[in-house]
Image: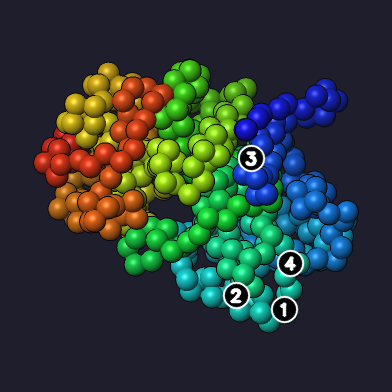
């Protein structure tokens, strides 16, 4: 059962812990300012060992993150008894490929790492997805630790055990379900993020409220601009609650055979937009924001989503200046063609997550082509 606890010691900084119960694969998500400084000790606890015991800690890290936090990360690992092995990776969706994975395999092979090695992902979602896939596959599985430093990764990709890479025009087509030993979320790392990166993560927070918890959604809506600017007192709670919602869903459906599919709200059209623009136009959360509006309009066409729900969502997204309309330069036929290649498609037919009401989503809806086309045409005018 998922639980969230706050730090009982008032002398310590505010913190929250979310526990994901998956039998022998259970782990904690720690949300605490400056927890990155305590990485080594937290890893020891997450791995259930006395100390690092000289284990190699292969740190897959973005160059900018390495510049900001590398020294204290490596020192923390050394202090805990680990032997750090930095592997600096250029981030970006275009690098989320099997070619990148192969280069990492080569480095690990040349360094003669053993099966006691720990893969540590420090960065955004691309770093986490690639590092997790490496951990799942190299030497048939290595221990894995997530240290997400972007808001998107903190509330989404670092939680739940989905890892993998893109293939051709299909996002996350090659991958695995592989749970980390611990997830360490440091909200202070968000201050170095550009505006669009913060907004990208905020889209996923909004999504969690929309699909699962109407009261949470309303709290987000009250201070969506403050959350975007990182000035809201609700930020740490919003991150922890997002993680808790995802954890509750994953506990019930780890391998996405049913309920977990609701987490894909907005992703069907969103992934298509990312692929059609070569991952260079939209940040992930921006594409998902457009996709959430698409899903609401499709739901309206099918008589499942009420127009008031669509209006509420678009108003919240507009406050944070998300794109909500469909770019007229994108051909609807191209979008439709890609939908059949979505990994959630069945027999070449896309499946959509739709909102029955605010805070309640259902998955697996096969939308008629006419309904999808009509919704996308309407979205062009927004």
Q: Nearer the viewer, mark 2 or mark 3?
A: 3
Q: Is residue 94 left or right of residue 309?
A: right
Q: Which mark is residue 2?
A: none
Q: Name the residue: 74% across, 73% down.
A: 114
> Where residue 52 sits: x, y (%)?
84, 59
Q: Earlier in the sequence, mark 1 or mark 4?
A: 1
Report the residue marked by disc 2: 105
Q: CA distance from mark 1 to mark 2?
A: 10 Å
x, y percentage for residue 357? 33, 22
* Residue topped by disc 1: 111
Identify whether 357 is placed above or below 144: above
The residue singled out by tag 4 in the image is 117
Reading the image, the residue beneath label 3 is: 21
For image coordinates 48% across by 49% down, the residue present is 255
| Placement of the C terminus among the 4 image quadrants | top left
Q: Are marks 4 and 2 in contact (CB under 8 Å)?
A: no
Distance from Cα at disc 4 to Cα at disc 2: 13 Å
Query: Residue 374 is drawn in which quadrant?
Result: top left
- Is residue 183 in view? no
Above or below, 194 relative to 87: above
Q: Secondary structure at mark 1?
A: loop
């Amino acid at each position: 059962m998922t639980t969230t606890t706050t730090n009982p010691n008032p002398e310590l900084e505010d913190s929250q812990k979310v526990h994901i119960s998956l039998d022998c694969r259970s782990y904690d998500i720690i949300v605490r300012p400056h927890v990155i400084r305590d990485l080594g000790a937290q890893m020891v606890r997450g791995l259930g060992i006395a100390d690092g015991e000289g284990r190699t800690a292969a740190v897959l890290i973005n160059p900018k993150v390495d510049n900001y936090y590398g020294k204290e990360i490596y020192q923390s690992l050394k202090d805990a008894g680990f032997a750090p092995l930095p592997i600096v990776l250029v981030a970006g969706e275009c690098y989320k490929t099997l070619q990148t994975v192969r280069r990492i395999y080569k480095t690990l092979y040349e360094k003669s790492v053993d099966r006691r090695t720990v893969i540590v992902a420090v960065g955004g979602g691309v770093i986490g997805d690639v590092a997790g896939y490496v951990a799942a596959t190299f030497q048939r599985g290595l221990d894995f630790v997530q240290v997400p430093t972007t808001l998107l990764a903190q509330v989404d990709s670092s939680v739940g055990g989905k890892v993998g890479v893109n293939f051709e025009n299909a996002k996350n087509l090659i991958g695995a379900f592989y749970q980390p030993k611990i997830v360490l979320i440091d909200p202070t790392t968000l201050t170095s993020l550009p505006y669009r990166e913060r907004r990208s993560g905020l889209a996923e927070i909004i999504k969690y409220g929309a699909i699962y918890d109407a009261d949470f959604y309303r709290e987000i809506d009250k201070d969506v601009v403050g959350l975007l600017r990182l000035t809201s007192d609700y930020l740490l709670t919003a991150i922890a609650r997002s993680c808790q919602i995802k954890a509750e869903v994953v506990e019930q459906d780890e391998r996405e055979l049913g309920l977990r599919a609701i987490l894909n709200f907005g992703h069907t059209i969103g992934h298509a937009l990312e692929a059609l623009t070569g991952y260079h136009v939209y940040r992930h959360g921006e594409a998902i924001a457009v996709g959430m509006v698409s899903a609401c309009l499709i739901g309206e066409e099918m008589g499942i989503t009420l127009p008031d729900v669509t209006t509420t969502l678009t108003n919240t997204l507009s406050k944070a200046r998300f794109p909500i309309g469909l770019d007229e330069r994108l051909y609807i036929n191209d979008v439709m063609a890609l939908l059949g290649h979505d990994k959630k498609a069945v027999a070449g037919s896309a499946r959509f997550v739709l909102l029955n009401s605010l805070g309640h989503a259902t998955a697996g809806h096969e939308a008629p082509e006419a309904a999808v086309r009509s919704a996308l045409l309407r979205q062009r005018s927004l």
